[in-house]
Structure formats: structure tokens, C-alpha cells
Image (cartoon, helix red, strand yellow):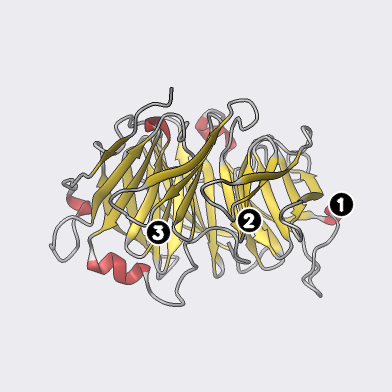
């Protein structure tokens, strides 16, 4: 029998950093928490598509949540299959279709969001496994696979994606476990957490050329090459990444120690340079990262943070908000997040939950909604995210 839903509206107090700099009160409050142990089986990522939030779960689930009422989100459809959907970690909306990354790449027809249809599955156990990041680039979608591969799919027909190329990053560049990726010009920027601190090696960010410098069109996978690499202690645990302009913003979660938000300058792809690193406030780990306007939103443990990145080489922390009532499990619970119109939508991986946070700070909201400053926080379907 399907477990009962728990839906609560919570207003929480904040830590000192959680208050607006002008003293106007907490920077965030909790609008709602939705818990569903079947539809949200260890929820990992979240992406918005219209009034729907799509949430995959590592335990083998995918859910569509109606967020038109922010104080009362509702699961309108879900599928749980611990075998076929095991390790479902990431989603990418493509118009009428949704790509789901598991140990396969799965295309879903979501034209009827209350009854999505599984359209196609691309399987290749050697190359496609443990997909943790997806980014669209024209008719290509690139995937970061945690067992050591970057894979390209042809999505010119999103109802029938196909394998278009792949690269073993362990053998080509030494990136052991790609966890996320984004586009920068003719390059893919890829992060490697280096064992999250369990091995005595630095974390890494690598740039792979995957497009022709003259035509900017795709090149065969056997011509992909690592052109630049940056390594550091602060990059240990690098598992989330977004590129804006000529900078990459990286979230790093280190076992047993504070993680970091790291800024890497990409202007010279052959010589990427780490230009800033800020410790995350919650020692339980940094797992979610999203840019909106001039604000970088972060999630991990029981904490959500906001950082001003209007000057990328001098990022400044705006707020740090601990939510023990929303993320009761604590360790590694707050996972991914996305921002829209004054609200953050956050997954609670170890709470089987989906949380809606209201942004109360006028200052943070003004920075988050600066037009032309950042990139739309609606997912990686765009060319630049």
C-alpha cells in the first residue's frame, strides 16, 4: 500500500546569516514540505517544466509534482521500479519529452503530465551507467557518468534518442568519476570529486574540446581531447557545476569536513584557474547548486545558502539558513535545488521529501532576478546550461 503523504506548512527561525543584511528578518521561510516514501524514493535532482517539478529518486523512482500552489505541492504521477529505474539521479526537460538518467538514458513523453509514457531507452552497460549530470547542446545531450565516461546522445528526435559518442575519461585526462558537466564555448567542463576525500588526491575540473573551433559544430568522439585541467584541495568532492560567462561555479562535498563553493576562471581553456573558494556552512556536505541572476543558491545537509556572484572572483555569502524541521535526516539530506519567482524547490534525499522555500529577503531576490545577469533557473535544456 502506498505510504501516506505528509504535507506541512512551516515557518522557521534562521541563523544569524539567515537574516537579511538590512535586519528585515529571515532570508528564507519554508512554504511546504511534501513527503512520499514511494514517489520520492531518495530524491536526487529536481527540474521545473511549467507548473511541474520532475524529481528522480536514487531508490528507483520518478515523480511529477504540481507546484502551481507553492504551499501545497502535489504528486500528480509517479513510477517506482527499483530494478528498471535504479539509481535515477538526473532529469532534463526537452519540451514534450523528459530525459531521465539512470543506468540507462530513458525518454518519457510528458505531453500528458498526469500520465507520462515511457518512449525509449538507450542502454550500453559499458559506457552508459550511473548518469549524474545532463546538459543540452543543440541536437546533442551530454551526460556525465560516474563510472568514468562522458557520453553524447543525439536528441534530434527526443522520443527516440541514440548514442552519438563517448569518451573514457579515466583513460583520457584522468577524471575518475565525472559527476556533472556544463558547456563553455566549444568545450565541456567536467568535475571529478576525487573520492570525496576518501583518497588523498585533489579534486579536478577539466575542459574537453568537443566542437570544431571554426564551425562550432560537433566533432567525432575520437577527436575529443582534454585541453585544460585545474586541481585543488578545495575541489575535493566536486559534484555540481554550472557555467556562467567565463566562470565555472563548482559545489564540492567532502566526507567529514566542510565542503566548498569554488570559482574557476575559464577565459583561457588551456589554463583554467581557481580564483575563489568559500567554505559551505554545513559540514554534512554540499550537494545542490543553481544560479539565478547574480545569486548562487546552494543546498546540503540541513542548509540552504545564497551567495552573491555579481563579481565572480569575489563571491560574498548573503545568507545561510538551516532547516532542521524540513530536513530532519540531516546528513546529506538537502540535495538539489532550483529557483523560480521568489521560491526555491529543494529535494530532501534522506527524508524522501520535496521542500518549497520562500525567499523573504528583498536584497537576495533583487539580485536573483537581475535580468541578463545569470541564466534561467529552469533546467539544462538551454544551450548554455
Q: Position of residue 221 (x, y in %)?
A: 83, 53
User: Please, which residue is most extreme toward the bottom here?
Assistant: 372
- Disc 2 to disc 1, C-alpha distance: 20 Å
Q: What residue is rendered at 43% in x and 26% in y?
A: 2
Locate the N terminus and report the quarter of the image it occupies: top left
Work out whether residue 363 or residue 376 is closer to the camera in this orientation and state it.
376
In this rendering, the label closer to the viewer, 3 or 1: 3
Q: Position of residue 356 (x, y in %)?
A: 33, 49
> In the rendered image, is residue 154 in sight?
yes
* Circle 1: element type: helix
Indicate which disc, 3 or 1, sits on the residue closer to the N terminus: 1
Report the side of 79 relative to 311 (left or right).
right
- Disc 3 to disc 1, C-alpha distance: 37 Å
Q: Which residue is mark 3?
A: 339
Label 2 environment density (alpha carbons within 10 Å; few <14, some 14–19, many ≥20): many
Indicate which disc, 2 or 1, sits on the residue closer to the N terminus: 2
Work out whether residue 200 or residue 129 is closer to the camera in this orientation and state it.
129
Above or below residue 195? Residue 264 is: below
- Mark identifier at residue 222: 1
- Quadrant of the image occupied by residue 24: bottom left
Q: Position of residue 239 (x, y in %)?
A: 53, 44
Q: Which residue is mark 2?
A: 135
Amino acid at each position: 500500500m502506498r505510504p501516506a503523504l505528509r504535507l506541512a506548512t512551516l515557518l522557521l527561525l534562521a541563523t544569524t546569516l539567515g537574516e537579511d543584511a538590512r535586519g528585515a528578518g529571515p532570508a528564507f521561510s519554508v512554504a511546504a514540505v511534501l513527503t512520499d516514501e514511494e514517489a520520492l524514493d531518495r530524491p536526487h535532482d529536481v527540474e521545473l517544466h511549467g507548473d511541474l517539478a520532475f524529481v528522480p529518486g536514487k531508490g528507483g523512482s520518478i515523480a511529477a509534482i504540481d507546484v502551481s500552489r507553492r504551499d501545497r505541492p502535489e504528486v500528480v504521477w509517479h513510477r517506482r521500479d527499483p530494478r528498471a529505474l535504479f539509481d535515477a539521479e538526473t532529469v532534463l526537460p526537452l519540451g514534450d519529452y523528459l530525459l531521465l538518467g539512470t543506468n540507462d538514458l530513458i525518454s518519457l513523453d510528458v505531453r500528458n503530465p498526469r500520465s507520462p509514457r515511457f518512449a525509449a531507452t538507450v542502454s550500453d552497460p559499458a559506457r552508459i551507467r550511473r548518469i549524474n549530470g545532463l546538459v543540452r547542446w543543440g541536437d546533442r545531450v551530454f551526460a556525465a557518468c560516474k563510472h568514468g565516461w562522458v557520453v553524447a546522445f543525439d536528441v534530434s528526435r527526443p522520443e527516440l534518442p541514440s548514442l552519438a559518442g563517448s569518451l573514457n575519461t579515466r583513460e583520457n585526462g584522468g577524471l575518475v568519476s565525472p559527476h556533472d558537466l556544463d558547456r563553455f564555448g566549444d568545450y565541456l567542463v567536467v568535475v571529478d570529486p576525487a573520492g570525496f576525500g576518501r583518497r588523498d588526491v585533489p579534486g579536478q575540473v577539466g575542459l574537453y574540446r568537443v566542437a570544431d573551433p571554426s564551425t562550432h559544430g560537433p566533432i567525432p568522439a575520437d577527436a575529443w581531447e582534454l585541453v585544460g585541467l585545474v586541481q585543488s584541495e578545495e575541489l575535493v568532492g566536486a559534484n555540481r557545476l554550472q557555467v556562467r560567462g567565463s566562470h565555472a561555479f563548482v559545489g564540492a562535498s567532502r566526507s567529514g569536513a566542510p565542503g566548498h563553493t569554488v570559482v574557476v576562471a575559464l577565459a583561457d581553456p588551456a589554463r583554467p584557474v581557481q580564483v575563489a573558494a568559500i567554505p559551505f556552512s554545513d559540514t554534512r556536505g554540499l550537494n545542490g547548486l543553481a544560479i539565478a541572476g547574480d545569486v548562487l543558491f546552494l543546498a546540503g545537509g540541513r542548509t540552504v545558502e545564497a551567495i552573491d556572484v555579481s563579481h565572480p572572483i569575489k563571491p560574498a555569502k548573503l545568507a545561510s539558513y538551516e532547516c532542521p524541521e524540513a530536513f530532519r535526516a540531516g546528513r546529506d539530506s538537502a540535495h538539489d535545488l532550483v529557483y523560480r519567482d521568489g521560491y526555491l524547490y529543494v529535494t530532501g534525499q534522506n527524508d524522501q521529501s520535496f521542500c518549497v522555500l520562500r525567499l523573504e529577503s528583498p536584497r537576495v531576490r533583487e539580485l536573483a532576478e537581475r535580468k541578463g545577469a545569470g541564466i534561467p533557473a529552469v533546467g539544462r535544456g538551454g544551450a548554455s546550461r
